[in-house]
Image (spheres, rainbow, N blue to C red):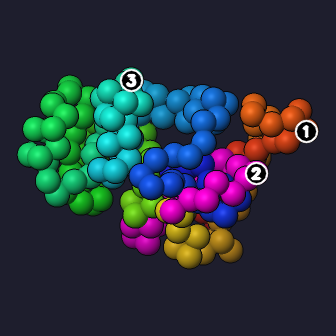
Amino acid sequence: LIAAVDKAWGVGKQGDMPWHIPEDLYHFQEKTEGNVVIGGRRTYENFFNGKLDGPLPNRQNILLTRHKDDVVEEYGSYDNLHYAGSLSEAVHKATGLSGEPWIIGGANVYEQSLDHGLVDEMWLSHLPHDYGCTTHFPQESVTWDAWRVVDEDQRRAPESDDTETFTIKHYEKR
């Protein structure tokens, strides 16, 4: 699982990511390229509606939707885009594809994956501001005593002064 969370554990605002931190996007790219990414419909709508004009490149993408035909009709088809009607179906499909599976959101997909014990590793970028998000990372789905931080990396947030950083924490289940 990989996510960026703001100070209030926000992950999105009205269907969009309310920050643009190139250093965090680079970290996301570095971790997920060459692998399988699993995300919900709203997460993928951000990719299709201007940000990328398609699925994430250099990855196998699995889009969770119960309305595959509607999505294909609206956005077209791509060689690196697969569909699943449930998270368990997506995980099953991911095992047949090359690369490590990464849960990329949104909040409901994070919650389902944590509640069903599908995650044993998390990379969370902790951002220093509250962006007034409308969707939040499901902290209540994480039994924090069962997790440990195995690595922590401080990085400079580029739109701030030189002293302000954000932290990327790598968590593993104990």
Residue occupying image coordinates x 48% and y 34%: 32
Q: Earlier in the sequence, mark 2 or mark 1?
A: 2
Residue occupying image coordinates x 30% and y 29%: 54
Query: Mark 2 packing: few (<14 Cα in 10 Å), some, or many (20+)?
Result: some
Q: Earlier in the sequence, mark 2 or mark 3?
A: 3
Does 138 sit left or right of 21 as displayed?
A: left
Amino acid found under the numbered disc labelled 2: Pro
Tell me the SS state at disc 1: loop
Residue of label 3? 58
Q: Position of residue 143 (x, y in %)?
A: 60, 75
- Determine the CA span between mark 2 and mark 1: 12 Å
Tell me the SS state at disc 2: loop
Badge number at residue 128 = 2
> Could you tell me if the residues under marks 1 and 3 are in contact, i.e. CB atoms within 8 Å?
no
Q: Earlier in the sequence, mark 1 or mark 3?
A: 3
Does 97 sit left or right of 30 as displayed?
A: left
Whether residue 56 is visible to the viewer of this picture, yes or no, is no
Residue of label 1? 163
Residues 104 and 19: in front is 19
Q: Which stretch did the figure color magenta?
A: 111-134
Amino acid found under the numbered disc labelled 3: Asn
Residue occupying image coordinates x 27% and y 46%: 63
The image shows residue 55, relative to residue 104, as above or below, that is above
Tell me the SS state at disc 3: loop
- Determine the CA span between mark 2 and mark 3: 30 Å
Q: Report which quarter residue 6 is drawn in.
A: bottom right
